[in-house]
Amino acid sequence: MQWSRELGAGYSSVAVAGDRIVTLFTSGPDDFLAAFAVADGEELWRLRLADKYVGHEGSDDGPLSSPMIEGGVVYALGPKGQLVAAGLEDGVELWRTQLDKSNSMVPYYGYTSSPLPVDGLVVVLTGGEGRAVSAFEQKTGALKWSVGDDSVTYQTAIVAELGGRRQLVAVTDHEAMGLEITTGRVLWSFGHSVGSARQESAHPTLVDSSHLLLNLQSESLLLKVSGAGEVQKAEEVWRSRAFANSLVLPVAHNQRLFGFTGRILSAIDPSN
């Protein structure tokens, strides 16, 4: 081991750019975004997000989402809805936008979506009627667009090229959507679940230029997205329990999919 550093509680992963590592955690009475040196773990700066998010019903204290880095700027979402941008070099806060019940669905265990910087926007799954997915201007934090009517829980959007179109893919508690990045216009949508049951940890895995795997709770679902025009079509190819009951996302490699069902690691051919 080259070095280790003890931090406070939280569920955040890390983002790395150049000689810096950034993450979120709770320390004492506060939640923080902080940067550390790759070489030796020295703390370089920290930015206070808000008072500590207190865990409840078995959950730990602290932040739940992970930061993202683009163009020398760190984007982070605190558990109490603090969407912030900070300079990677010095941690100086560039802007802050507050998510709350006026512009999102306040999650029971705190805000968890990781902000996705793309094409001058920061995309966050916010949840609620007309605002399942929201995009904010990278330079100011001002709201650019919102779309969708579903609830969200632990999901984060991705960028993918499907059917010849580069797009956002967002999976909410009941639906998967392909969105035009600049406007939020819906290119395709697919209801992956019905009824009151919510797929709170549903996430997409890009398989190839036409297919997405949705990691649901009790099964996995392969979608085919086709059409390069203004409107695309999403069709179900198969459902399988090859990947289920695991928060570990499947990955695609060498024309195979690798993932877990519970503690069992499996590899499947998605074409079968």
Image (spheres, helix red, strand yellow):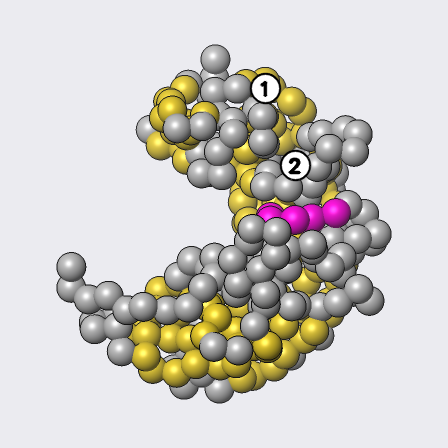
Q: Position of residue 232 (x, y in %)?
A: 70, 35
Picture residue at 79% right of the left edge, 29% below the top: 195
Q: As rendered, which of 43 and 259 lies closer to the eye?
A: 43
Image height of 207 relative to 2, above or below? above
Q: Position of residue 56 (x, y in %)?
A: 61, 56
Crowd band around label 2 with a 10 angstrom C-alpha radius: few (<14), some (14–19), many (20+): many
Magenta-colored segment: predominant secondary structure: loop
Label total for image:
2
Image height of 191 relative to 79, above or below? above
Marker disc for residue 199: 2
Q: Is residue 181 visible?
A: no
**For the residue labelled by badge 2, is the local secondary structure a helix, a strand or a loop?**
loop
- In this image, 28 relative to 120: left or right? left
Specify which label sits upstream in the sequence, 1 or 2.
2
Q: Nearer the viewer, mark 1 or mark 2?
A: 2
Q: Quadrant of the N terminus?
A: bottom left
Picture residue at 79% right of the left edge, 53% below the top: 128
Does 155 lie within the magenta span? yes
- Extent of the magenta region: 151-157
Does 169 lie within the magenta span? no
Marker disc for residue 239: 1
Question: Tag 1: residue type?
Answer: Arg
